[in-house]
Amino acid sequence: MFYHIKELQYEAKPTKPNPVNAKLVQEILGGQYGEISVMMQYLFQGFNSRADKKYRDLLLDIGTEEMAHVELLATLIANLLDGAPASVQEEGYKSDPVVAAIMGGMNPQHAIVSGLGAMPVDSVGNRWTAAYIGGSGNLLADFRANLTAESQGRLQAVRLYELIDDPGVRDTLSFLIARDTAHQNQWLAAIAELEEAEGDVVVPTTFPRELEKQAVAYDFYNLSRGEASKTGRWASGPSMDGKSQFQYFSEPGPFAGKPKLAPAPPYVHDTPKFTKNTFQSYGMPDPMM
């Protein structure tokens, strides 16, 4: 059960209205790594968690905080849209709010669709989609995805901070950036705990390791021009799971021969021209005989 506290988690007061800034802020609300995405990702992972209850609580605690961040950004966008669009445009086109919105760099849907409110879209108007989120039920895999989401989200918020010079917007962003820092550290702590418990850095499964092709399990293949990658930690020395050694191959060869596909049957009208020799070479009867 959720309940709403009417106060915001933090202030969302820009110094002045700016519909262009409202359009930019939409990215960290409804973009791939925006607050809607992490809110939905963490909550669904938590709802579905069958693991230790502390991990479920971790997911639901942070996921619920992301709800607050969605509200915070929605409020910030609405405040940035106050008086928009006509009041921020030149006199020559003030009389037409739609033209003013487009010419001024505003998302015109803020004026036409949402009535000067936030929308579940990114900065160029792409609708938010659940395809952005992931939840596998494997906590180590999921927590690593969460770390990536927080890393990308913080990066975008920092870039947005550089793009917007409004002190009020920057203050709100500063709070969100700090919370992203906290969440990155918390996901890293949970990842480290799970890795220690499993005694492995590979995402745990019940799939027996001996069924893997062990001969290639720790190889690094140089498949681009040059050998700069040879100097990396990933190319030589003990593997990260401590179970083997990395091996570097400067000119890795193929493990199998050329593919040889049988011709498609005539009824599918495929591209190859079928001849008697073609079918004989595959030991197939000539369908035209």
Image (cartoon, rainbow, N blue to C red):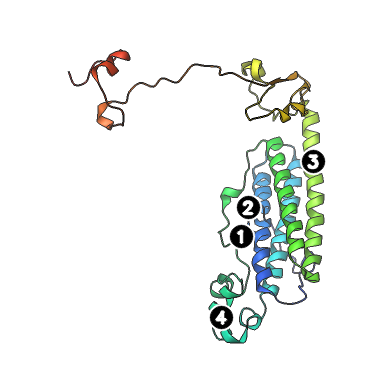
Measure how far apart labels 4 and 1 are at the Cα level. Answer: 22 Å
**Mark closer to the chain start, 2 or 4:** 2
Measure how far apart labels 3 and 1 are at the Cα level. Answer: 27 Å
Q: Which residue is depicted at the point 62% across and 47% down?
A: 133
- Residue mark closest to the camera, 3 vs 2: 2
Residue 72: x %, y % from top left: 73, 65
Mark 4 residue type: Pro
Residue 85: x %, y % from top left: 61, 78
- Dot 1 falls on a residue whose secondary structure is loop
Crowdedness of circle 1 by 10 Å Cα count: few (<14), some, many (20+)?
many
Is the residue under label 2 in contact with that under label 1 (CB below 8 Å)?
Answer: yes
Crowdedness of circle 2 by 10 Å Cα count: few (<14), some, many (20+)?
many
Above/below status of 221 relative to 156:
above
Q: Nearer the viewer, residue 225 or 78?
A: 225
**Residue 188 disc label:** 3
**Residue 32 disc label:** 2
- Residue mark closest to the camera, 2 vs 4: 4
- Dot 2 falls on a residue whose secondary structure is loop
- Residue mark closest to the camera, 4 vs 3: 4
Which residue in the protein does label 1 denote?
Answer: 122
Measure how far apart labels 4 and 3 are at the Cα level. Answer: 47 Å
On screen, residue 183 versus residue 149, left or right, reads right
Mark 1 residue type: Asp
